[in-house]
Image (cartoon, coloured by chain):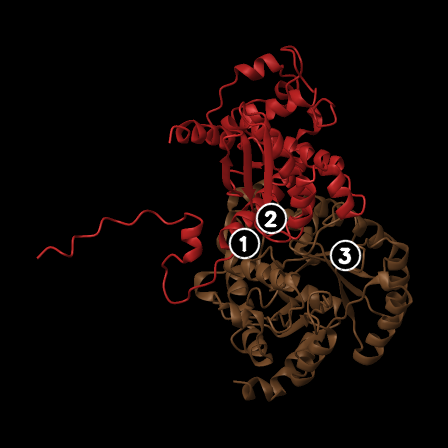
Chain colours: A brown, B red
């Protein structure tokens, strides 16, 4: 819960968090080393000075760190923890669903664990979706279209194998498809940043919610154009939000574009923990106001009501979180004190 | 060392030529972005250029376009007969460096590593964005100065050339816009329209605001990427020192540290 300076309680759903192991012991090769180093560069490039971590902690933090940073020192009420396998880079994977599930089990009520699959695995991918639903009752998945797999250097959401997987997701009630359309991860053949495949998939799967993480950056221009045409396309603010500190003017222009094109009901907060921690992001976001000229030019505003939607209400709707019931459950949970 | 002076002058010219190589995604010179780390020209006229991108994962298609630009620009300098490019610490550094040293073309190497990727398509996509970015600055400057949609849409290249912008960004973009305009064959003679869409259509006089909306999206995206890339380039290899704000080894390696202040002579009594 985030309590505003005016004393209002804001329910926070952190739409994008990780519990990874990028330590040298787990790195399988140079790619694993470079991958976590790139994350660390994001962390150091965009965090306020007083929020910086030492590299060793960044590479591998504990479940207690995660819990404390999100829920005790941080304002999150619920966090969606995404799964990212990267088995070609990390011996035990980067943050697999098993690893995420252990932390979710330890801190009940706090985490929503999302799965992941790779449509290029064919039948195995379909089996794996069944397995994740049965074992972890997942409501969502995280997709990496730019991930390597054997000789393949990426895939598209509208590939036939992918459609088979999404049909199954629809059937099993796995409704929230988070798609990494953002920087850093192995963009190779053609233009793996490209967001146009979202357009096809969102049109063909109206029952599914397509959460485009990082808002398609670095293709924000294309993403906005697609999102305006599809009501089931959402933009996740991870990576975009930290600019609120280092480049507030860019952030203002960007969030104004998103409000104009994507809309206030379709934007989701995400810290991308552990790249950034949620406390400072939420504080700055709550305090942030659009400059007058940006408001005028775009005809949008970032009111407290809209901020509240972005910080939690929108994601709660997607994940069926009953906010009042959740507040009660959290109030009764002894763990928030025990982990102190 | 009689060769030292002319050699370094030649190197200076190569550096200057590299100012013309843009990061396709950001439309800014790779020299200003700090991507070029070293330039050396041997007595035989072999230019060696070392460059490094903000991350190991930077899109290889851009890396290839930049490397190709480096080679072409360096070769345009009189006295340079051969160019050797060294891309450092990148996912595809080995493939690119080896491929180039074997005399294979960029398109061939890129096609092989990307499973048939086409550099021309990428080049076209980003030239379109660069065109829009440059044009937007000029259109907004003209509107701010009181021009209406009709005046802008019907302005000739001759009139454009006589414009004198006060806004520094517009001054900067004016020749860059003109260069793309003529390169693309969109205008050339003084009576040609100065402003067209990238697809050679006249600007929509009745819907100029919508057109500007589209250009704005492109600009915001580019600025965002530029800011991100600069931030990442700056922090690459830099470990956080939580105790104090002094330069680390990497700062010295990258020449980011100003020369030390003259120290007082401690040996004096």
Q: Earlier in the sequence, mark 2 or mark 1?
A: 1
Quadrant assignment for the N terminus of chain B: top left
Residue hosting label 1: A243
Instruction: Give the SS element for disc 1.
Output: helix
**Residue displayed at 55% across by 39% down:** B49
Q: Earlier in the sequence, mark 1 or mark 3?
A: 3
Between A278 and B67, which is closer to the camera in this rendering? Answer: B67
Q: Nearer the viewer, mark 2 or mark 3?
A: 3
Residue hosting label 3: A145
Instruction: Give the SS element for disc 3.
Output: loop
**Residue displayed at 81% across by 56% down:** A151
Q: Identify the mark at residue A254; answer none if there is no mark.
A: 2
Mark 2 and mark 3 in contact? Answer it, CB < 8 Å: no
Label 3 Cα crowd, 10 Å radius (few <14 / some 14-19 / many 20+): many
Q: Quadrant of residue A61?
A: bottom right
Mark 2 and mark 1 in contact? Answer it, CB < 8 Å: yes
Between B52 and B228, which is closer to the camera in this rendering? Answer: B52
């Amino acid at each position: 819960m985030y309590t505003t300076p005016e004393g209002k309680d804001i329910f926070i759903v952190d739409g994008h968090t990780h519990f990874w192991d990028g330590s040298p012991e787990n790195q399988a090769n140079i790619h694993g080393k470079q991958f976590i180093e790139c994350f660390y560069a994001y962390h150091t490039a965009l965090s306020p000075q007083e929020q910086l971590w030492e590299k060793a902690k960044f590479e591998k933090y504990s479940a207690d760190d995660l819990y404390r940073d999100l829920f005790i020192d941080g304002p999150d009420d619920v966090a969606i923890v995404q799964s990212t396998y990267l088995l070609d880079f990390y011996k035990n994977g980067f943050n697999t669903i098993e690893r995420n599930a252990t932390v979710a089990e330890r801190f009940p009520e706090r985490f929503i664990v999302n799965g992941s699959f790779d449509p290029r695995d064919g039948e195995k991918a379909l089996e794996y979706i069944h397995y994740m639903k049965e074992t972890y009752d997942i409501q969502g998945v995280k997709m990496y279209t730019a991930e390597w797999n054997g000789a393949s250097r990426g895939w598209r959401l509208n590939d036939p194998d992918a459609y088979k997987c999404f049909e199954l997701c629809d059937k099993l009630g796995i409704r929230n498809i988070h798609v990494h359309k953002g920087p850093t991860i192995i963009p190779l053949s053609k233009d793996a940043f490209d967001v146009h495949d979202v357009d096809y998939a969102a049109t063909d799967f109206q029952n599914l919610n397509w959460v485009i993480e990082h808002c398609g950056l670095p293709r924000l221009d294309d993403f906005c154009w697609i999102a305006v045409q599809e009501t089931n396309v959402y933009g996740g603010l991870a990576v975009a939000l930290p600019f609120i500190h280092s480049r507030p003017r860019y952030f203002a222009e960007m969030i104004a574009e998103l409000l104009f094109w994507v809309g206030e009901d379709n934007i989701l907060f995400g810290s991308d923990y552990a790249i950034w921690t949620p406390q400072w992001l939420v504080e700055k976001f709550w305090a942030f106001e659009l400059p007058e000229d940006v408001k005028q030019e775009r005809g949008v505003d970032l009111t407290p009501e809209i901020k509240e939607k972005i910080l939690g209400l929108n994601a709660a709707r997607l994940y069926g979180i009953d906010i009042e019931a959740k507040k009660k459950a959290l109030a009764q949970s002894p763990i928030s004190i025990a982990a102190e | 060392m009689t060769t030292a002076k002319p050699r370094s002058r030649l190197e200076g010219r190569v550096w200057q030529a590299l100012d013309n190589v843009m990061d396709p995604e950001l439309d800014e010179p790779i020299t200003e972005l700090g991507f070029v780390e070293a330039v050396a020209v041997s007595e035989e006229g072999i230019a060696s250029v070392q460059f490094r991108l903000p991350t190991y994962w930077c899109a290889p298609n851009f890396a290839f376009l930049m490397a190709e630009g480096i080679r072409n620009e360096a070769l345009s300098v009189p006295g340079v007969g051969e160019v050797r490019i060294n891309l450092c610490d990148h996912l595809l550094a080995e493939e690119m460096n080896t491929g180039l040293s074997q005399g294979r073309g960029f398109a061939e190497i890129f096609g092989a590593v990307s499973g048939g990727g086409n550099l021309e398509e990428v080049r076209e996509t980003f030239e379109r964005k660069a065109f829009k970015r440059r044009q937007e600055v000029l259109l907004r400057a003209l509107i701010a100065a009181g021009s209406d949609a009709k005046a802008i849409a019907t302005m000739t290249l001759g009139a454009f050339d006589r414009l004198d912008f006060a806004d520094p960004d517009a001054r900067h973009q004016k020749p860059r816009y003109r260069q793309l305009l003529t390169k693309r064959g969109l205008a050339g003679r003084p009576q040609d329209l100065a402003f067209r869409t990238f697809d050679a259509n006249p600007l929509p006089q009745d819907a100029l605001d919508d057109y500007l909306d589209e250009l704005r999206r492109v600009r915001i995206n580019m600025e965002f990427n530029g800011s991100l890339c600069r931030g990442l380039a700056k922090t690459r290899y830099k470990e956080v020192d939580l105790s104090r704000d002094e330069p680390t080894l990497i700062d010295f390696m990258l020449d980011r540290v100003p020369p030390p202040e003259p120290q007082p002579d401690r040996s004096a009594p």
